[in-house]
Amino acid sequence: MAASLGRDTDLVEVTLPDDRELKIELHLQPSFDVELPIDFDLSTLNLAGASGLLDLEGKAKFDVHVGADLKLDLGIDLSNPDRPRFFLLRYDSRFRRGQAASGG
């Protein structure tokens, strides 16, 4: 299904393991990269007496990378088609299934 939407096939997986339950697995890995310039000049801080003792200036670039790994497994109980029931699957570390999140 994800491939037909033109998306990464690891993003979403939909399965129908039996006639009573539809499983939807979402795996999101958002990330953000930015380069921040740093321009430091001690004299601009107007510290009393510091400008006469120290002359400190500098420029640099600060690289920031933030990422997250979010996994969400949803289910829809179809045993009663007139009243479908939505639920979250529990995380099972042995099979790496269920809800999990991490960041860095």
Image (tube, rainbow, N blue to C red):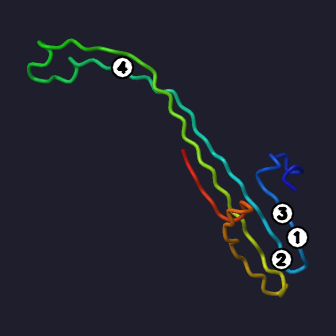
- Quadrant hosting residue 58: top left
- Residue at mark 4: 39
- Give the alpha-carbon distance from disc 1 to disc 2, as whole Å: 6 Å
Which element carries disc 4, helix, strand or loop? strand
Q: Nearer the viewer, residue 2 or 98?
A: 98
- Chain-order first, disc 4 or disc 3: 3
Amino acid type of disc 1? Answer: Leu
Q: Position of residue 14 (x, y in %)?
A: 83, 63
**Residue at image mark 1:** 16
Q: Are marks 4 and 3 in contact (CB under 8 Å)?
A: no
Drawn side of residue 54 relative to residue 18, left or right: left
- In the rendered image, residue 42, in percent from the top left (x then y), is placed at 23, 19
Do the CB atoms of the residues marked 1 and 2 lie less than 8 Å apart? yes
Is tag 1's residue or tag 2's residue first in the polypeptide sequence?
A: 1
Q: Alpha-carbon distance for marks 4 and 2?
A: 58 Å
Are circles 1 and 3 on residues that touch, CB within 8 Å? yes
Determine whether label 4 and label 2 are within 8 Å by CB: no
Locate the N terminus by quadrant: bottom right
Amino acid residing under circle 3: Val
Residue 14: give its label.
Answer: 3
Which residue is label 2 attached to?
Answer: 21
Within 10 Å of disc 4 (Cα), the crowding (few <14, some 14-19, many 20+) is few
Label 1 environment density (alpha carbons within 10 Å; few <14, some 14–19, many ≥20): few
Classify residue 33 by image quadrant: top right
Count residues near mark 2 (Cα–Cα under 10 Å), then give few for <14, some for 14-19, many for 20+: some
Disc 4 versus disc 3: nearer the observer: 3
